[in-house]
Amino acid sequence: MLRAPRGTGDVLPSESRKWICLEKVLREISFKYNFEEIRTPVFEHTELFSRTVGESTDIVEKEMYTFEDKGGRSLTLRPEGTAPVARAFLEHSLGQGPLPQKLFYIGPMFRYEKPQAGRYREFHQYGAEILGSPSPYSDVEIIALAVDIAESLGLTGTKLVINSIGCPVCRERYRGDLIKYLSARSDAVCEDCRKRLSKNPLRVLDCKNVSCKAVTSGAPSMLDYLCEDCQKHWEGLRELLLRMGLSYEVDTSLVRGLDYYTKTVFELKWPPLGAQDAVAGGGRYDGLVEALGGKHTPGVGFAMGLERILLAVEKGEKPFREERALDFFVIALGQETRLDGGEKASATRDERIPAAQNAAPGADDDIFRRGFFLVREIRSLGLSCDFDPLRRSLKAQMKQADRLNARYVAILGEEELEKKMVSIRSMKEGWQKEIPLESVRDFIEKEVLGRGNQC
Ligand SMILES: [Zn+2]
Ligand SMILES: [Zn+2]
């Protein structure tokens, strides 16, 4: 039997409702903040990521799904969403429209990582970007959006951690001093960090290795190197956060693995998740659009991994209700059970599926047709409704209605049809009423208040 590739997964019907609910919440809150959705291709030219994400990052070095297409182009399944958004921003001259542009995306990303609990090679991210604003107000808006999303999903008690990694001007001086500091202690850091040391020394700061942590705890801090512009931005950010009532911690070891980040870096943590408790991460990337050949366009944004968010929501205060619910199930009954009379079931045939019924039109078909019309009518009222196309027995259909968690069942049999009535049964309250077929619409409108379980 073929299985899905390692590190990928199917979202089955039992889970898909959670995804739909999550995406609905994400879109609603984004629109509230006046962000518009952007959808970019799942693959891009490899160059987009090697130029922006940076050659010396883990992503480009080991984690990209890169392939050559039949035309000999090097393409890469997107490992993250910000560079594609910036590429689209440039390609479609969105910068010539009103600024800032506020965009969000939801979609799959791909990284060749070691699969582990909650980490996949195909994973999903929501992200939001503000392009064209250097103001710390935009940083705070992005942070507030992330906090708002977490709280709306029932993740209360999140912790905001912030840092500034400066700009290319002030970072250069810092980089030099950091390399000096780390080089003198290169024996004490892990092998990965020894390699990172000269190419991407900032990455050593967020290595989780215990001995690396011990080394970096005494390392110089970027905050002591900020240039005037970066310092002003950093102060503006902290003051605004305080005024907004968004408390934060400063963690100078918080850096991003991506080269194009500048100034603000932040992470939103939700402690109940344990060791991997970051639910959102982002920051400012003033150099990104320029790196792609555009005009200088400051940007700030964040992303959240949806698999981890769903895991968190389960543990939070508002877990999604996953039970499936149907408003109506219509049962049309002909000659009681038409489960195949003479035909012998073959070994491979699913016993639960009766043989095809190409029965000649007759009284039964009239009932089924009326039942089918009723299904359509109920759906036209905005209610969800289903029926059994396999014409099984009343008992089997009641069982199915039950399995589908139907709130009401409408039964249409020969007797009912003769009287031009339909029986409506409330599965929750237990009552059953006979309603004239012609007024069933009125009855449903009056009695069946509200919709089923929506998210
Ligand atoms: Zn600076
Ligand atoms: Zn290390």
Image (cartoon, rainbow, N blue to C red):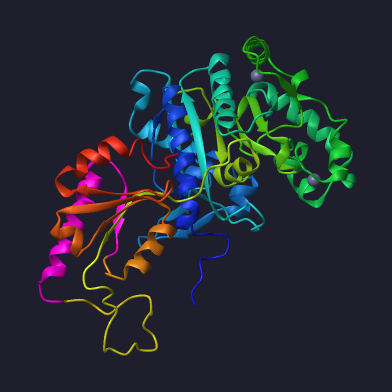
Residue 362 image point, x, y percent: 10, 71
Q: Please state, as top left, top right, bottom left or bottom right, where the C terminus lies in the image.
A: top left
Res. 303 image quadrant? top right
Q: Is residue 292 visible?
A: no
Residue at the spot x=54%, y=19% of the render? 141
Q: Is residue 213 visible?
A: yes
Q: Is residue 216 above or below residue 246?
A: below
Q: Nearer the viewer, residue 339 or 27?
A: 339
Residue lying at the far left of the rendered structure? 361
Residue 338 image point, x, y percent: 26, 76
Res. 100 image quadrant? top left
Magenta region's main secondary structure?
helix
Q: Is residue 93 left or right of residue 313?
A: left
Residue 399 image point, x, y percent: 41, 64
Task: Report if residue 365 lies within the magenta region.
Answer: yes
Span of residues in magenta: 359-388
Residue at the spot x=62%, y=34% of the render? 281
Residue 298 image point, x, y percent: 51, 22
